[in-house]
Image: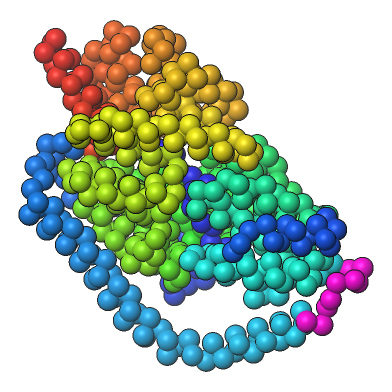
Amino acid sequence: MAPRTNDGEPERERPASLPGTNAPVTETASGEAPGATPGEAAETADASDTEGSRAAGPAGETGETPESAAADADADADRVAAVRRVAAAGRRWRSVQLGACAAMLAVGLTAGAIALGAVRDGGATPVAAAAALSPGLLAGADLNTGIASLQAHLRDQPRDFGGWATLGLAYVEQARTQGDPSRYPQAEQALERSVALRPDNDQALAGRAALAAARHEFGDALAHADRALKQNPYNERALCSRIDALVELGRYEEASAAARTADERRPGVPVFTRYAYVHELRGDVTTARRVLDQALAASTTPGDIAYVATQLGQLAWNQGAYDTALTHYARALAADENYLPALEGRARAQAASGRRAEAIQGLENVVARFPLPGPLVELGELYEARGGKGDAAKAEAQYRLVDAWTALARANGVNADLDTALAAADHGDRAAALRAARAEWDRRRTVHTADALAWALHVNGKDDEALPYARQATATGYGNAALLYHRGVIERATGHPDDARAHLTAALKLNPGFSVLGAREARTALKTLEAAK
């Protein structure tokens, strides 16, 4: 499973407390407290148009008849429909409470529009955007519409530093959620414009942190987040980007402290999800699940519901609870039927459950719209496992697309070495995989970069050198079947059969369908080890 960071997920920038309270996350089960010129400006604005039951058996051991496939598909559809019925009832109930608030909001937005209309370009003082242009209104399905509105606004008021910061953040969201790295240079230009107009504005500094994190430049992300927090210690995006950066630099204790600080200052969905991931990385799945459940209960918008439900689905899938994962993905898709991570996660859970035909169809739809490395590799491996006429060529085409995405990402300032190392080690240039893995390890030392380097060393025949990295990848207690599988294979190759047997068994017990090819190879290796006893 690829690292689950926020680089591929939308940010949700709004304060939110748990239902019925203004307090931060409650005490955990373990007793811890979670706790340019006007002309150039117009050109930049115009640059964009617009998880508990386990599966019956490992992947590949479940027969799939047309009747069972149809029944499974109906079950998935029923999940989504049921969630939508409950959500509709909740919306009807809330609409009564929200009626008066809507009237007050309309007055507030009208006043904001009047204030904006009274300030026109030509004055010496930069202006800030009204509440109607807040980043929270750019999240979800209306992102493109929000960007278009911001562009029009900035053509009229190119000195609005807050508007430029919001536009920069919106481009970051567009790049990450739509798989389009070409938006990152546009985000950079917009954020630079905001800083030029008001150097100390925390919105733009936090935007720079988010952009750097999206480009996998986590040292820069940490520096920008710290600068933003000096200006505004309560900036939610900066608090969240600081957690992301520390996690992706492998500084897990500091990330845990940063998550507690963020929870004290700005409790809400973005902080809760990060707090949960920090605990998952340390092997505390119980706390991670509980905090995500609280985050989902605190979610009210379709974007937040889709985001948090998908995080719960990924956590469940990582523990081999595929039915539970599918239920969470159904809730996410009921909120946003086009939410990419939920569509990808559902296909992965279907594949792990033996429903490969549905998984292939789902991933084909995903990569047709968003050809990102994770789903491309997953689809290629499913083609390989199916082994039908033309499937080998189809698989190879997916792996070549990973190379194309990597080239595009690098051309737009994204550090793609981890993606390269993970994909190329199994399906590409092994020497290039090792170079990329070494480069990434030099930049940041996480469980995922340790695993990537260990596996790249293994496929290049350097198992003795790989073993310490494989051990380091599993040292935090993070329960990830792929990491356990890699360690078991490397231990077998270095003459540690008992350790290899233990870790291969653990991988298949935790998540028997973690990879359609990897799980098959793990079972083969385990049988060989058992026969040699």
Query: Can you say whether 377 is above or below 170 in the image?
Result: above
Q: Residue at x 51, y 23 (%)?
A: 437
Query: Can you say whether 511 is above or below 130 in the image?
Result: above
Query: Can you say whether 469 is above or below 308 in the image?
Result: above
Q: Quadrant of residue 164?
A: bottom right
Q: Nearer the viewer, residue 379 or 435?
A: 379
x and y, in percent, of residue 179 in the image: 50, 48
Q: Residue at x 78, y 82 (%)?
A: 117
* Residue most extreme to the front: 390
Q: Nearer the viewer, residue 215 or 45?
A: 45
Q: Magenta stretch containing residue 124, yes or no?
A: yes
Magenta-drawn segment: 117-125
Q: Nearer the viewer, residue 264 or 234?
A: 234
Q: Magenta stretch containing residue 497, yes or no?
A: no
x and y, in percent, of residue 114 in the image: 75, 85
Q: Please give left or right for residue 49 compared with residue 356 in the image.
A: right
Q: Quadrant of residue 263?
A: bottom right
x and y, in percent, of residue 372 in the image: 45, 42
Magenta segment's dominant SS is: loop
Q: Residue at x 53, y 19 (%)?
A: 435
